[in-house]
Amino acid sequence: MRYRQASPGLRWQAPHPQHVHHLCVVRMADRDEFRRRVPFGTALHYQRALTQQPAYRRFVRAPCPEAERWAAECVSLPCFPELTDEEIEAVCRALQ
């Protein structure tokens, strides 16, 4: 993917041969600042770890710090078939 090539130093989801790539998620410690400054839309698909979901609170037996860190840092980048080459390049520039 071009985003990964443009910014290999970012913390990406681990590659997997059967990944369907319906989302493009990256971890950013400064996620909110990044989202404010970029000229394109982003999303927060996983704002809470399962252990933080109100409906599952009664089932939590122990904290899941790695999942909770992921939830606090992940941001979904534009990823859909209609993206133009220019839009992809704009995202790549913002990631550098």
Image: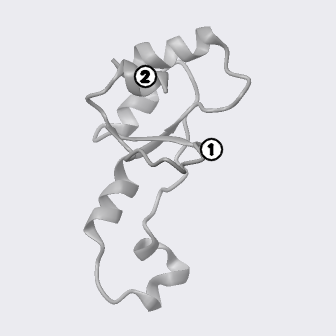
- From what the image shows, is residue 47 above or below residue 32? below
1 or 2: tag closer to the N-terminus: 1
| Residue ID at (45%, 32%) | 35
Q: Distance between the residues labelled 1 and 2?
A: 24 Å
| Visual colour scheme | one colour
| Residue ID at (34%, 23%) | 7
The amino acid pointed to by label 2 is Arg
Q: Name the residue under label 1.
A: 22
Answer few, some or many: residues within 10 Å of disc 1's Cα (few below 14, many 20 plus, some between 14 and 19).
few
Query: Which residue is at the far right?
Result: 82
Kindly indicate the quadrant of the structure image that contains residue 51.
bottom left
Residue 60 drawn at (x, y percent)? 39, 86
Which label is found at residue 37?
2
Relative depth, front residue between 36 and 12: 12
| Residue ID at (29%, 84%) | 62
The count of marks equals: 2
Q: Give the structural element (helix, strand or loop) at label 2.
A: helix
The amino acid pointed to by label 1 is His
| Residue ID at (41%, 44%) | 15
Answer few, some or many: residues within 10 Å of disc 2's Cα (few below 14, many 20 plus, some between 14 and 19).
few
Left or right for 5, reference 1:
left
Relative depth, front residue between 24 and 72: 24
Q: Give the structural element (helix, strand or loop) at label 1.
A: loop
Kindly indicate the quadrant of the structure image that contains residue 11.
top left
- From what the image shows, is residue 52 above or below residue 89? below
Residue 84 drawn at (x, y percent)? 67, 14
Kindly indicate the quadrant of the structure image that contains residue 81.
top right
Left or right for 58, reference 29:
right
Which label is found at residue 72?
none
Quadrant (top left/top right/bottom left/bottom right) for the C terminus: top left
Residue 37 drawn at (x, y percent)? 43, 22
